[in-house]
């Protein structure tokens, strides 16, 4: 009797995320302190950060900053050194006794997140709001925010896996890569960006293949689009994926109008939020400037494209960080963790069988353009925001920025290379679950050993 794939996948995901929530020392996920501050601010109903002395942030309980300083040694957004030392669980849990003392407040800087839209913080802010009502201290609030974030991300991805018409097994493995689950188990908005983009992609591809679309589908697609685009406009090209529906339906005009409405509504909301939040956007790295860098790109477009291609080539398309370099990108995984995706791809593709009709070829070409557009926008955003003027490479790009493209990449790969099934879906599913389990063991073991949590 075959093991039910999706329930088993969800159980493995839950066990991995729950383990990482508690064994990962506080604020060891990238930018987690900033996201924690921003989530707390939103839980109090403050939709936008304040600006003071060239920084952006807000008035928060002093205990939040003390907690960050205890575990990181600093509240600076970008410190040269971040401690990666022993963090026994007993010593960590001892900080649960620290009271929140919400009346004792200070201006707290979190310039990298003060302008982020609230939508992607709903799970974390909601959990913090409940925790405040219960009288929880700052560390308990952090764990509650992590838990809500992780559960929300896994729920959205599981929903997406149910809908994904092709490449489900490969997408399921990719969705639980070490870097991805590490982010799900944090307060980072990356969790909702990744999972909402995953669900959006799965929904659109499902409805394209099935040639049907309802009002509820439009509402869900718009909600997902707002969740990832308001926070990360670099993934706007994903909204163009739905226009491929004209290849599979006779109601082409209706399909175009539907997806144009989703696109326009999302773009309008994104532009309005960017205008509203512009005052809270400050430069956080010396030698950078978006206006000056944009002028450079316009004047030297070839130099800019060479910088993008050079960065992608020399960083091997950021594969290592995509699979996982944990902590503040300083905790590498064992070599097998980087090799396991290879058998996962082979195993998953061996169960796919798809004929390449003209419509499917056009859909694949369209999807590849969308995927490439997202990658280019990610690189461009980091070139404008984080790279010194005229620099020959793109600085600040991390493999995790490509995780929202998991579902689209897996589907395109399965459609393109899955020509003839060599084994059944049950065999592929069982094998993928084993590989997911092995990745989970390596991930949890690496975190536990690196921080000496036991």
Image: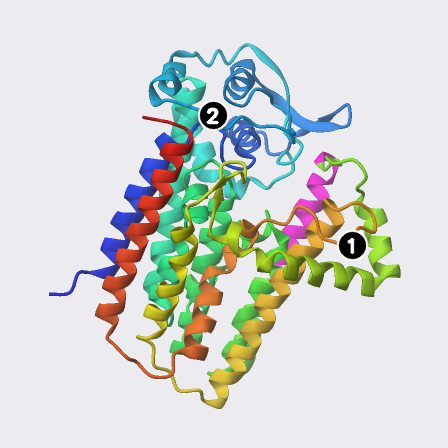
Residue linked to disc 1 = 392
Spatial CA span between label 2 and label 1:
35 Å
Q: Which mark is residue 85?
A: 2
Assign a secondary structure to mark 1.
loop
Q: Considering depth in this image, is 4 or 80 the residue closer to the camera?
A: 80
Q: Residue at x 55, y 52 (%)?
A: 399
Q: Which residues make up the magenta segment?
A: 265-280
Label 1: how many Cα within 10 Å (few below 14, some 14–19, many 20+): some
- Left or right, 394 with respect to 234, comes to right
Q: Earlier in the sequence, mark 2 or mark 1?
A: 2
| Residue 371 rendering spot, x and y as whole percentages | 57, 66
Residue 115 against residue 393 in the figure, above or below: above
- Residue 275 inside the magenta-drawn segment: yes
In the image, farthest residue toward the right: 299
User: In the image, 453: left or right of 281?
Assistant: left
Nearest the eye: 97 or 304: 304
* Residue at image coords 35%, 45%: 442
Q: Crowdedness of circle 2 by 10 Å Cα count: few (<14), some, many (20+)?
A: few
Q: Is residue 65 visible?
A: yes
């Amino acid at each position: 009797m075959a093991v039910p794939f999706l329930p088993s996948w969800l159980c493995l995901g839950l066990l991995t995320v729950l383990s990482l929530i508690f064994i990962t020392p506080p604020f060891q996920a990238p930018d987690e302190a900033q996201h924690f501050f921003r989530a707390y601010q939103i839980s109090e109903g403050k939709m936008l950060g304040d600006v003071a002395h060239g920084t952006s942030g807000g008035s928060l309980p002093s205990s939040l900053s003390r907690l960050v300083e205890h575990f990181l040694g600093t509240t600076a957004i970008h410190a040269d050194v971040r401690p990666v030392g022993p963090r026994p669980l007993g010593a960590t849990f001892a900080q649960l006794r620290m009271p929140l003392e919400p009346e004792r407040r200070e201006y707290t800087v979190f310039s990298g997140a003060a302008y982020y839209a609230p939508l992607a913080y709903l799970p974390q802010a909601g959990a913090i709001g409940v925790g405040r009502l219960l009288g929880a201290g700052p560390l308990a609030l952090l764990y509650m925010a992590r838990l809500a974030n992780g559960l929300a991300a896994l729920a959205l991805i599981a929903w997406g896996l149910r809908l994904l018409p092709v490449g489900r097994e490969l997408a399921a493995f990719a969705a639980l890569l070490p870097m991805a689950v590490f982010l799900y188990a944090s307060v980072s908005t990356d969790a909702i960006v990744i999972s909402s983009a995953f669900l959006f992609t799965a929904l659109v591809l499902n409805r394209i293949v099935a040639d049907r679309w309802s009002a509820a589908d439009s509402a869900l697609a718009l909600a997902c689009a707002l969740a990832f685009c308001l926070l990360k406009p670099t993934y706007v090209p994903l909204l163009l994926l739905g226009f491929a529906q004209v290849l599979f339906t006779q109601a082409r005009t209706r399909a175009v109008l539907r997806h144009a409405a989703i696109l326009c509504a999302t773009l309008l909301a994104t532009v309005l939020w960017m205008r509203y939040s512009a005052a809270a956007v400050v430069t956080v790295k010396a030698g950078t400037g978006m206006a000056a860098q944009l002028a450079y790109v316009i004047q030297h477009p070839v130099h800019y494209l060479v910088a993008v291609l050079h960065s992608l080539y020399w960083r091997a398309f950021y594969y290592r960080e995509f699979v996982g370099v944990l902590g503040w990108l300083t905790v590498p995984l064992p070599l097998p963790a980087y090799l396991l995706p290879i058998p996962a791809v082979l195993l998953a593709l061996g169960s796919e069988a798809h004929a390449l009709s003209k419509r499917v070829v056009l859909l694949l070409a369209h999807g590849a353009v969308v995927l490439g557009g997202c990658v280019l926008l990610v690189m461009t955003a980091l070139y404008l925001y984080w790279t010194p003027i005229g620099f020959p490479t793109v600085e600040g790009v991390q493999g995790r920025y490509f995780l929202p493209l998991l579902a689209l990449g897996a589907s395109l790969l399965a459609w393109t290379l899955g020509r003839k099934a060599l084994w059944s879906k049950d065999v592929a599913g069982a094998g993928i679950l084993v590989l997911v389990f092995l990745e989970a063991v390596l991930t949890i073991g690496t975190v536990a050993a690196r921080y000496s949590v036991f």
